[in-house]
Image (cartoon, grey):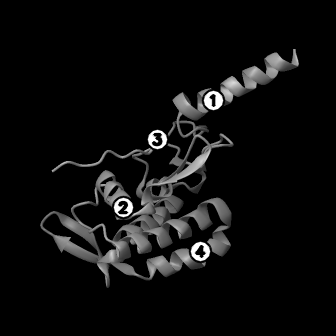
Amino acid sequence: MTTTPDPRPLVGEPLALDLLNTRWMKDGVVQDLLSGSRGLAVWLGSAGLGERFEANPITLAHTKIARDALHAVVDGSLAQGAENLDLVLDQGRIRATLTADGPGEIPEFDDPRWGPGWLAARNYLELLAAAPDRIRRCAHEACILHFYDTSRNGTRRWCSMAACGNRAKASRHYTRAKES
């Protein structure tokens, strides 16, 4: 089975932010991995959800609703966006379990096509509970990517130092050189 490589410049963030990062800028144009079911399949595979959920038009629509709700709370207002995120969270629940390995939790959905979006919304709640100040948007003005700052001192500013960090440094250098 051949898999399509994930074209996004930043992958591997926690699920909630990884879903937000299915939109990114390239040459000044917003790219959207979730523009169709094929892109959803790429994201599901990249996020480790490809074996669990089917990439179909309804899953795509539900996942985009979750992404928009996450965008509203991360880049907008938590108070205003919470209602939209709660609508996504209403689509599933956690069932507590006990196995031979000990206590556990199993997510359950009335409609599994809500699964990827629900898991991302739930992950956002986990990130908020752990360290809400570590949920960040890249500081580069032309970047729309998000990341979870895992640096020791919590001062990461860029989605990638190699990309956005260097562009910002080069821009500042150019501005200083132009002013002198």
- Mark 4 burial class by Cα count in 10 Å: few <14, some 14-19, many 20+: some
Element type where label 2 sits in the image: helix
Q: Is residue 160 above or below residue 144?
A: above
Q: Using the rendered image of the protein, determine whether residue 134 is visible from the camera's viewpoint.
A: no
State the residue lying farthest toward the right.
180
Type of amino acid at the residue the image marks with label 3: Pro
Of badges 1 and 4, the one in the foreground is 1
The residue sitting at 48% across, 63% down in the picture is 124
- Mark 1 burial class by Cα count in 10 Å: few <14, some 14-19, many 20+: few
Looking at marks 3 and 1 on the same chain, the residue that comes earlier in the sequence is marked by: 3
Type of amino acid at the residue the image marks with label 4: Ala
| Residue 150 relative to residue 158: left or right | left
Q: Which residue is mark 2?
A: 40
Type of amino acid at the residue the image marks with label 1: Arg
Q: Which residue is mark 4?
A: 82
The residue sitting at 51% across, 62% down in the picture is 129
Residue 112: image location, x then y, percent:
30, 77
Type of amino acid at the residue the image marks with label 2: Leu
**Residues at marks 1 and 2, CA–CA distance in whole angstroms:** 30 Å
Looking at marks 4 and 2 on the same chain, the residue that comes earlier in the sequence is marked by: 2
Q: Which residue is mark 1?
A: 167
State the residue lying farthest toward the left.
100
Residue 13: image location, x then y, percent:
43, 48
Q: Which residue is mark 3?
A: 9
Looking at marks 2 and 3 on the same chain, the residue that comes earlier in the sequence is marked by: 3
Residue 116: image location, x then y, percent:
36, 67
